[in-house]
Structure formats: C-alpha cells, structure tokens
Image (tube, rainbow, N blue to C red):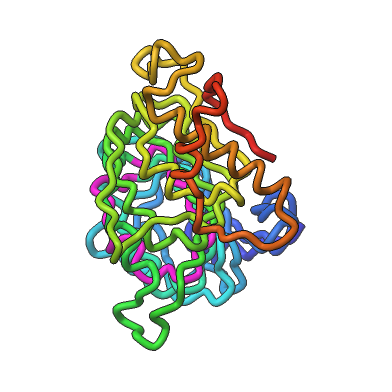
C-alpha cells in the first residue's frame, strides 16, 4: 500500500492512496484517492493547504470529520484527474454555508460525481451548480435544504468565467436528495430532463408539489428509468408529473407511503375520481405498447388522453408501487 509523504500532504489527517482498498471505489475499481479523516477540524485556509493535494488525485474524500471554510479560503488548484468529490461530515448547525462552486472553481468542469452528506447547502441556488458541465451523479444527503426552486440547474451547462466551455448539454443522470423539502417545483428538472435516468426523492417529507414549467422550459424525462417518491406526504399525483415521464423507458416508480397524510383516495378499489386512475391507465398503455410494438415508438407520446378515453373498458385496483419491466 503506497502513501504520500506526510510532509507533502495538505493536512496531517490526509493520506494519498494511489490505488488501494483504503481509497474510493467508483463502482468498478479503487481510484487514486486523497482521504482526509480524523476527529480534528479541517479549517481552510488555516490548517489545510489546498496547494498540497496530490495532482494525481481522482477522488477527494472527507470522511467522518468536520470541514470549516473561512471567507479568505483558497480554492483547490486545478487537479486534472479529479472526478469524485465526496464529503461525509459530522453534523453541526454552526458550520457556515459551504462555498461549493467557489472552492471547486478550477475543477468543476471535469468533476463527474458530487456526494455531499451533512454539508451546509442551505439556500441552494443555480450559482451552486454553475459550470458543472460533466456532472453525472449528484447526491445531497441532509444538507439543510428546505426547498428546491425551478432554477437550480439553469446554469449547469454554463461556465461564466470560461465561455468557450459553455453550452455543453448537461449530462446529469443520477440525482438523489434526502432532506426536509416540503416544497418542490417540478420545473427544476427542465435543464436536465434529457439525460436524467434516476431520480430519488425518497423520504424528503414532501407535501407540496407544483410545476411552473411551460413551453419554453418543458419537462419531459425521456431517459428516466427509476423514480422514487416513496415515504412522502403528497395527497395526489398531479397530472403534470406523470405526463412528464417517458413511460416507455420507465422501469420503476415507487410512491409507497406509510404516512396517514397520504390518503390519495379512500375508495381506491375501482376508483375513477382521482389522479391515480388516469396514471395507472397510462402505465397500462405503456406496458401494452412495449409488448405489442415491433418498431420504434415515439417516447414523447404517452397517449394519456387515449388511455383516459378507453378507461371505462376496465376497472383497476390502484397499487401505490408501479413496476413495469
């Protein structure tokens, strides 16, 4: 097992692992990792010298520790191989908001994975993700986020300080968030709707789901495979939600909940009075289309109106977990 010379490390609690089980596993193998973990705080710039991070680092990982970034911090230098930025911190209300975009300004255009746990990202907005043009996976876990506005991904394909790199279509395929988000505007998906394959909104205590999407900023998740909205408190599935899904590509949609607030409809056996009925008719149409079609189908046509028109031909017991493999 190789380690970097402690003298050249950015902090005494950091170790560089070229490739070993101590490093970060990207899903297929361990990658060169700078791992920072200890009970003491990492304070930027006072006790952490960003210029000493090994240039071969592919994953920068702060694990089970505390990171404090002061106003006079220095951003990480350009680390040409950096693809994974992971922070799994101890929880603290006292920690200042983390300057995600500023501290990664020299690396954001080649980072593919962001994984933040207990990092203060309160007041999340579009400036946070400006220029993360190659971001493929984003996970935000208990980051003090209470609302998701429609514009948070509007600048993900734009780099203000490097216009020549702008205009790359967002590549975000996986978005996972776990927090107390009681309000969400479905229009936030518009900039990433072409690429998104997995959307996990499980157990975020969601009560209010709205959409301000329009013809100029439409939402159609043409590549979606899995949507998890389980363990929330929404009382219905708005039509705009299931009309935004490509039911041909969708393999799993989970909206199971054990909250009493999520009643949907008391008379759910054979019910035609709530949104779930139309949705299940659309799912039935999609499954039949998969089975019957010998040629290409139009993914942008969910044909929900046709499903509703012919709904009287069958009664339906509504399940709260839909799986159409």
The residue at 47%/35% (across/down) is: 279
**Residue 296 versus residue 43 in the image, above or below:** below
Image location (x, y in percent) of residue 146: 27, 38
Name the foreground residue: 42 vs 98.
98
**Residue 247 versus residue 52 in the image, above or below:** above
Total number of numbered discs in the rendering:
0
The residue at 42%/83% (across/down) is: 165
Location of the C terminus by quadrant is top right
Location of the N terminus by quadrant is bottom right
Q: Is residue 150 left or right of residue 35?
A: left
Is 138 in the magenta? yes
Report whether residue 105 is seen: yes
The residue at 45%/48% (across/down) is: 116
Name the foreground residue: 241 vs 65.
241
Name the foreground residue: 117 vs 249.
249
The residue at 39%/88% (across/down) is: 164
Image location (x, y in percent) of residue 290: 68, 48
**Residue 215 versus residue 139 in the image, above or below:** below
What span is in magenta? 120-143
When asked about the image quadrant of residue 101, the answer is bottom left
Determine the main secondary structure of the stretch shown in magenta: loop
């Amino acid at each position: 097992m190789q380690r970097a010379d402690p003298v050249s490390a950015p902090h005494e609690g950091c170790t560089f692992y070229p490739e070993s089980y101590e490093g970060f596993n990207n899903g297929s193998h361990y990658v060169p990792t700078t791992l920072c973990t200890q009970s003491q705080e990492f304070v930027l710039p006072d006790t952490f010298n960003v210029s000493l991070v090994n240039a071969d680092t592919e994953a920068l990982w702060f694990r089970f520790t505390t990171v404090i970034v002061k106003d006079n911090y220095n951003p990480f230098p350009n680390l040409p191989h950096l693809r994974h930025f992971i922070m799994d911190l101890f929880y603290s209300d006292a920690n200042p908001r983390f300057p995600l975009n500023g501290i990664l300004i020299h690396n954001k255009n080649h980072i593919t994975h962001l994984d933040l746990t207990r990092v203060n990202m309160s007041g999340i907005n579009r400036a946070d993700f400006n220029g993360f043009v190659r971001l493929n996976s984003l996970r935000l876990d208990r980051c003090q986020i209470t609302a998701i506005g429609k514009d948070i991904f509007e600048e993900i394909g734009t780099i203000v300080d490097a216009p020549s790199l702008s205009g790359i279509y967002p590549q975000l395929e996986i978005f996972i968030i776990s927090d107390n988000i009681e309000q969400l505007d479905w229009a936030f998906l518009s900039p990433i709707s072409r690429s998104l394959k997995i959307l996990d909104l499980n157990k975020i205590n969601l009560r209010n789901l709205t959409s301000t999407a329009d013809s100029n900023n439409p939402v159609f998740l043409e590549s979606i495979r899995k949507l998890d909205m389980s363990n929330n408190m929404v009382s219905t599935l708005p039509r705009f939600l299931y009309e935004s899904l490509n039911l041909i590509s969708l393999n799993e949609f989970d909206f199971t909940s054990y909250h009493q607030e999520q009643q949907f409809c008391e008379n759910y056996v054979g019910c035609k009075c709530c949104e779930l009925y139309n949705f299940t008719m659309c799912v039935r149409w999609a499954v039949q289309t998969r089975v019957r079609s010998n040629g290409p189908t139009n993914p942008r046509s969910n044909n929900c109106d046709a499903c509703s028109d012919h709904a009287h031909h069958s009664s339906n017991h509504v399940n709260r977990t839909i799986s159409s493999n």
